[in-house]
Amino acid sequence: TEVIPGKDQKHGGRMDFVLSQLVKNGVLESAAEGGFRLPQGRIEKVSWLDVAAGTAPIARLVNEQFSEIINVTSTDITDTGIKVLGDNEKEGLIFIKTDIFKMPFPENHFEVISAYDIMEHLTSPQGAIEECFRALRPGGLIHIVVPNPDTLFTRANNPRTTYQRDPTHMMPPIVSTDYFRKVLSGTGFVGVEVSTRGHAETGVHFRESGEELFKPEGG
């Protein structure tokens, strides 16, 4: 059974981060009581693509709170989300079954693309990142979240994490801070910021030393 998390839980925290960045970028404005609104004169809703969305928790959470200003399209290679959402397109809940490496969207289409807990399952994340770049509007925001295989928490095989025991984690050595910084920048993204949970200084460390706080296993 899946329960949509609260504001300070996993998906709620991710949603809040994206919303804060949209305000920072001028796409949204802060409103009373912690809310958000479109800038004056803008009519079009913010377009958000959540790839590899599974049961579409992000879309359901955003739609529940911000359906008047944000449209979320969810995709996955399975049809799980279609079964969960049902016939809800009229409510802005759109789910498309598609491959992340070849999505049926035109270039420069979305203002936000999120990819949560998917890159570590791919043998070649770079291809998926390039496809997201193609579908993202210039000046848009991409938010990627992956587990970090280089943390002591993960290396200790803590029973609270399934990272080491998950056979679908294809290439754990590459999902590290230096990998994503290089691939995102090489693809054409600018303003790349990388952080790791519990180590907010990752970006500062890189800017000051030119070296990553965490590196690939064996690197």
Image (cartoon, grey):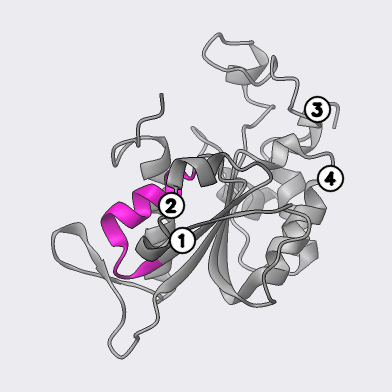
Q: What element carries label 2?
A: helix
Q: Residue at x 43, y 54 (%)?
A: 87
Q: Disc 2 versus disc 1: distance between alpha carbons? A: 5 Å
Q: Disc 2 versus disc 4: distance between alpha carbons? A: 26 Å
Q: Residue 213 placed where, x, y %?
A: 66, 38
Q: Which residue is drawn at 53% across and 46% down?
A: 82
- Which callout, 2 or 4, points to the residue nearer the camera? 2
Q: Disc 3 versus disc 4: distance between alpha carbons? A: 17 Å
Image disc number at residue 72? 1
Q: Disc 4 versus disc 1: distance between alpha carbons? A: 26 Å
Magenta span: predominant SS is helix
- Which callout, 4 or 1, points to the residue nearer the camera? 1
Q: Mark 3 points at which residue?
A: 217
Q: Which residue is drawn at 84% across and 45% down?
A: 124
Amino acid type at mark 2: Ala
Decide which of 61, 218 is in the foreground and name it: 61
Can the viewer see residue 217? yes
> Badge 3, how many Cα within 10 Å: few under 14, some, many 20+?
few
Counting residues from the start of the chain, the first of labels 1 and 3 encountered is: 1
- What residue range appears in magenta? 56-70
Q: Is residue 10 shown left or right of residue 145?
A: left
Q: Name the residue under label 4.
A: 124
Counting residues from the start of the chain, the first of labels 2 and 1 encountered is: 2
- Which callout, 3 or 4, points to the residue nearer the camera? 4
Image disc number at residue 59? 2
Q: Is residue 19 shown left or right of residue 160?
A: left
> Badge 2, how many Cα within 10 Å: few under 14, some, many 20+?
many
